[in-house]
Amino acid sequence: MSLDSAQWGRRLTDLAAQYNVPGAALGILKEGEVAEAATGVLNLRTNVPVTTDSLFQLGSISKVWTATLVMQLVDEGKLDLDAPLLEVYPELKLADAEVTKRLTMRHLLIHTSGIDGDIFTDTGRGDDCLEKYAALLAEARQNHPLDATWSYCNSGFSLAGRVIEKLTGDTWDAAVRDRIVKPLGLTRTVTLAEEAIMHSAAVGHLYEDGKNTVAPVWGIPRSAGPAGAITATVGDLLTFAKAHLNGDILSDASREQMAAQQVELPDKHTLGDSWGIGWERMGWDGHRLIGHDGNTIGQAAFWRVLPDQKFSVVLLTNGGNGAKLYEELYREIFRELAGVEMPQRLGPPETPVDVDITPYLGVYERASIRQEVHVDDQGPVMTVRVTGPLAEVLQEQDAHYRMVAVAPDLFVCQDPETGNWIPATFYQLPTGERYVHFGARATPRA
């Protein structure tokens, strides 16, 4: 079936308006054919229109790029995923001495290190920012024991970026440019704000009280680059997808290892059912997909790859309810173009489930986030507070998520702004520690 850019452009425009998304770009790849569409504006202050050549922040999709750099070094014999990182990065020092001895690159890439994952300390704009950031991890909390569970970890990818610097002798930004951007002929992919300003670049918008406002800052700290600072067009991201599908950028063994299951997820309702090396893994309608989502300050990105059909879809947005736009648009695209039915997002059950909330009450805390589970006159509530450097940027008020039980240890929490439902899974490690898995992070009870 031939791709119809005009058809999907119309759907993109209609759904973006419905879900209050200021601007968005869509890219579809099917067996080498590409369709692109754009709608809305880059910035509500300037009303400059989005085009298919506009750059959006990819957020955590950048982690797939960082993982690709790592696997290139594996292909070159410069790195062993399962060797202690101390062998190639002897400067490593973490709060837990035993973790320091045993930590491997695989732990970082599959989010099982247990290092507190949301440390967004800005270590400056210099080329030494990752070196400084890695040194700060000596004070980072160990949220759970090594390998004990899975918890999304931005900090681990910044550390991985520093190891890349040690092994290549250059900055992570230069490694992205020299090892991926230039070889693939990408002309609109950058890692730094001063590069993005040379293009038509989207600005993030925060959605509060039913309206979008321009985000107070444009980008994240340079020290978070390997975790989320790549900015690109839908076309360049699809070219990167083709490179993975066709084996143009890695050995077949490394490409297959990236897509293979490395760890099962404790929450199978938010991002997927398992994780590869850098990739999220999802099972849709009997098909295996890989991909990644990304969120920065007011921008959200969604990327899915269906390898057995050489099919990929990219959606980049700059505010509003991008998650709802993604769900509805991707459901239509995958049904019509790939014959794959996208699963429904978990929501409240038709028949109420009676669960004793008592074992789950209390405060759960990690870097940047404090969550308190309590009960009011309407039932259980999770109150979420952003803390630390991130709070200073976002200036957010406490968010109160109404909780509805789905199973004895599984709840869905309703976002007070968008109305979207977010799963919250409670579990206990064999060692006795209790955690809530909410928004892809395992947060320990204080």
Image (cartoon, rainbow, N blue to C red):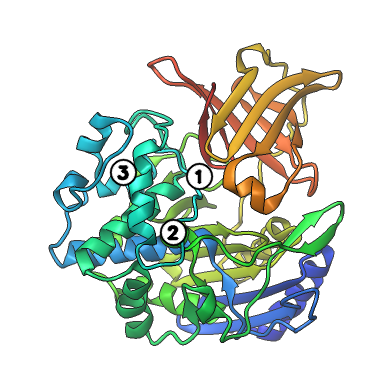
Label 3 neighbour load within 10 Å: few <14, some 14-19, many 20+:
many
Left or right: 248, with 369 as reference point: left
Residue tagged by mark 3? 107
Give amino acid for label 2. Answer: Ser
Label 2 neighbour load within 10 Å: few <14, some 14-19, many 20+:
many
SS label for mark 1: loop
Number of numbered discs = 3
Name the residue located 77 percent from the left edge and 70 percent from the top edge. 22
Residue tagged by mark 1? 118
Viewer-proximal residue among 266 and 192: 192
Q: Label 2 to label 1, Cα distance in Å? A: 12 Å
Viewer-proximal residue among 87 and 236: 87
Left or right: 23, with 439 as reference point: right
Q: Position of residue 421 (x, y in %)?
A: 71, 41
Residue 113 shows in the view: no
Give amino acid for label 3. Answer: His
